[in-house]
Image: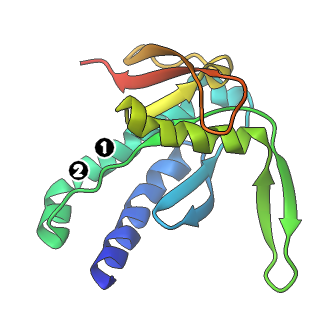
């Protein structure tokens, strides 16, 4: 357990700069999952959240030898990005915290689950893409409508990768 905990601690430390540099804010860390949010404003139009994914991948790749030496493996990760309205509320009594609620949160979580089924590391919704102009060095592959677990309506999904 300690080795896995050390690996996760190191990974969270190593990806933090990429998140902050790309305007993200870590909302929560749940197990090995990190929930990052961005304001849906004019800065989003440049695709900062998508660029963040690749900056994290680069940060891990730069330290791959170190991860391999220390832990015997290099961490991999998957991510999903979606845009929409959320309700933010302070919850709890003895331990208060901010919680995000709503369909946007649920769709993002289900989209992340769908990454594995789609064999892709980064999936984004058409809703998110409607708010931005992704960099030209990215390849957006339309995957069509996806029926996500627990959702009545399908959403349009795109896989994103760097051009070779």
Quadrant containing the C terminus is top left
The image position of residue 77, as x and y in percent, is 37, 48
Between 131 and 89, the one lying in front of the other is: 89
Where, by quadrant of the figure, is residue 13 drawn?
bottom left
**Kind of element beneath mark 1:** helix
Of residues 96 and 132, the one drawn nearer to the viewer in this rendering = 96
Residue identifier under label 2? 62
In what quadrant of the picture does the N terminus appear?
bottom left
For the point 46% across and 55% down, the residue is 17
Q: Which residue in the protein does label 1 denote?
A: 58
Residue 143, compared with residue 63, is above or below; it is: above
Q: Secondary structure at mark 2?
A: helix
Q: Are marks 1 and 2 in contact (CB under 8 Å)?
A: yes
Residue drawn at (73%, 33%) of the image: 40
Judged left or right of residue 118, residue 104 is right
> Disc 1 and disc 2: Cα gap in Å?
6 Å
Q: Is residue 162 above or below residue 144?
A: below
Left or right, residue 66 beside residue 52: left
Front residue of this view, candidates 132 and 149: 149
Residue 114: % across, % down? 49, 36
Q: Quadrant of residue 69?
A: bottom left
Location of residue 41 by image quarter: top right
């Amino acid at each position: 357990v300690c080795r896995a905990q050390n690996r996760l601690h190191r990974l969270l430390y190593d990806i933090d700069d990429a998140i902050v540099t790309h305007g993200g804010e870590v909302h929560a860390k749940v197990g090995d999952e990190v929930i990052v949010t961005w304001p849906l404003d004019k800065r989003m139009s440049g695709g900062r959240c998508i660029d963040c994914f690749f900056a994290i991948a680069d940060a891990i790749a730069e330290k791959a030898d170190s991860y391999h030496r220390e832990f015997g493996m290099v961490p991999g990760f998957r991510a999903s990005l979606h845009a929409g309205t959320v309700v933010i509320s302070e919850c709890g009594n003895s331990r208060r915290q901010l919680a995000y609620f709503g369909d946007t949160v649920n769709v993002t979580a289900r989209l992340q689950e769908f990454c594995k089924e789609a064999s892709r590391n980064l999936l984004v919704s058409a809703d998110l893409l409607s708010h931005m102009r992704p960099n030209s060095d990215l390849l957006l592959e339309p995957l069509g409508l996806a029926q996500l677990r627990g959702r009545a309506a399908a959403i349009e999904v795109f896989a994103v990768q760097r051009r070779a």
